[in-house]
Structures are given as structure tokens and as C-alpha cells.
Amino acid sequence: MMKNSIIWPLAILIGLLGALIAAQREKEIVSRPNDPIPKKEVMKLTGELKGAKLSRDVSILWLFGPEDHRGGEHDYIRIKELFVPMLKTIPRVTVDEAFQFPTQEQFDQADLLIQYLHLPDLTDKQLSMFQKFVDDGGSVVSLHESCIMRPIAQAEKLAGCIGCSWKGNQTSKWGKFAHDHPVHLKTEHPAFKGLPNSIQLNDESYWNLLKRKNVEVIGAIAPASDQKFEDVLKSEGVRSDAFWTYTSGKGRVFGTTTGHYTYTFHDPIYRVLLLRGMAWALDENPAPFMPLAFQGITNDEGFVGTKDTMMDYKNRKR
């Protein structure tokens, strides 16, 4: 009895100490983009681009919402205005936009839904529309906070549409990460085949999410390691759910909980991951998407990326 009475307070103390250390580490993480890298290094990941074509016409629907953080974070409108014109430069691609939630007509016309927003309180009818879109063969790319919905009953339904969702503040976690905790990639998966085993970002992610049966985690955040991906997922303190794929019915979903900062979307390696995800969700060759990894972020010296933290931005509601 005495032994147990000592162990429990000690376990609580260790837990509190771990939380304090994690909180202190969060404060010490500097929000800044990666240094630009030579174009030739990015081209090693994009592969041959000459003559690459989509196999069909593709209609993309970009779903966005009101910006809800300080400038440089959750810039949903700003990122939409960055990517929509770029996507339109891909031959055979058309792009439409939806604010907060698509109409049924927009769902009917879309091949790929890309969502970057904090979803509003969706009705059961809207969630059914979303689920039907996926099950009937629609493709989805879900970015960062797009996986969050409350209460838990609605979160369950959202997970049915995209594979993962926020399980509740007592279970799911969020936090920033830096270069000492790389994003480890499952390079056996077709979406990430041929890419490095890990990449470095200064960003934010969520983990301990509610996951549906057909979810495959293909990206996780953990200390630097030479372990195989499956062993990284089992390691202490791992943040899984950084990237995942999901199938439901005939549909394919590529999701990530990263993408908090605007500068992250100007990182060429991160763009490669997203463009690979779009292509995988559509079951298309990624090569036609790859020019976007360079677009607008390549300087005259042949370096790709940005040094701008992009925090000097005024949010907009629409």
C-alpha cells in the first residue's frame, strides 16, 4: 500500500515535468522559413518534367474560410490566392472556389477538393454531401486545421470524409516543431516514393487524432533517427498524423496537419509533398504538377524558397 502511494505521486510529477519541458521547448522554437536551396536540389525530387501531361481534364475546387490568426498563420485567403492561379497554369486543369462549404453543384463538378480552413459547424446534410462526394470517387486534399471539428459526434462524421479528425482537447494534441524533430516520411508509399526519408520544417502539427480504419499514416514527426518508418511510429514521443492517406468507397484522400505558417507554403520541398498528394488523390502522374514547386519562389541566382517570415500581413474575413 505504501509503495503504491509513492509511485502515483511520482508518476504525476514525471508527467508534469515532461509537460513543462515540452512547453519550454515550444517557447524556444523560432518561427522562420528554411533557407532557400539550389533549384538543382529540388529537381532531384520533381523528376523529369518535359512533356508531362495529365491523362484527363481535372476540375479542382479550393475550399477556404475566414482567416482566424495573426498574419502569417492560418492565412486561408492568402494561400488560396497563392495556389489557385498556379493550379490554373497546369494544362487540362480548371479551378473553382468555395467559401466555407461547397454547394451540391460544385461537388458534382469537382474531381478534387482542396480544403484549407477551419470548417464551420456543418449540418448533417452537409456532412452527407461531403461523404457522398468521396464515396462516389471524389478526391480530397485536407490541410492543417481542416481536420478540426467539434463536438466529437461531428468529428466522427468528418473523419468518415477525410480519414482523420480532432478527437477532443483532452485527447488530441497540437504543437510547433523545428529541425530537431524532422518530418519522417513513409517512402514505400506511392505518394512519397523516391523522396528523402525525412525533411525539416519549422511549423506546427496535430496528433493523436481520431482515425478511420482505412487510414495509412505516411508522415510523422519525431527526433532525428535512422530507424525505419514503422519503427519511428512506435518511438517515444512521436507525433503521428503529420501526413496520411485514406480511401472510402471509390474516393482517395491525402491529408496533413502541417501547414500552419504561410512561409511553409513557399518552401519547395513542402510544395513537392503537397503536389505529390494531389496527384496521388487523383491517381495521376505527379510530373504535371511539379512546375508549381518552383513557381514564384525561384530567384535570379537559381535558389528556390523564401527568407520572408510573412508575419506582416493583415488578415481578412473573405
Image: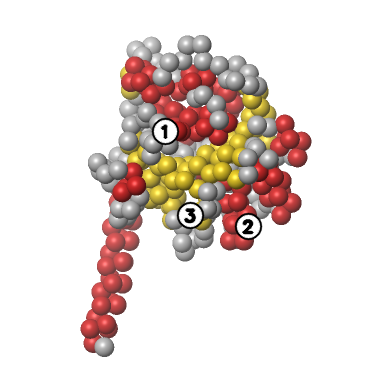
Residue 21 found in image quarter: bottom left
Q: Amino acid at mark 3?
A: Leu
Residue 10 picture location, percent across and down? 25, 74
Residue 256 picture location, percent across and down? 48, 42
- Left or right for 302, reference 148: left
Q: In the image, what residue occupies the spot 63% across and 29% down?
A: 60
Residue 179 picture location, percent across and down? 30, 39
Q: Taking the image as drawn, is residue 263 in sight? A: no
Viewer-proximal residue among 87 and 33: 87
Viewer-proximal residue among 222 and 302: 222
Query: What's the CA distance linking mark 2 and mark 1?
Result: 31 Å
Q: In the image, what residue occupies the spot 68% across and 36% down?
A: 98
The quadrant in which the C terminus is found is: top right
Q: Residue 209 shows which numbered tag?
A: 3
Q: Are marks 2 and 3 in contact (CB under 8 Å)?
A: no
Q: Residue 154 shows which numbered tag?
A: 2
Q: Are marks 2 and 1 in contact (CB under 8 Å)?
A: no
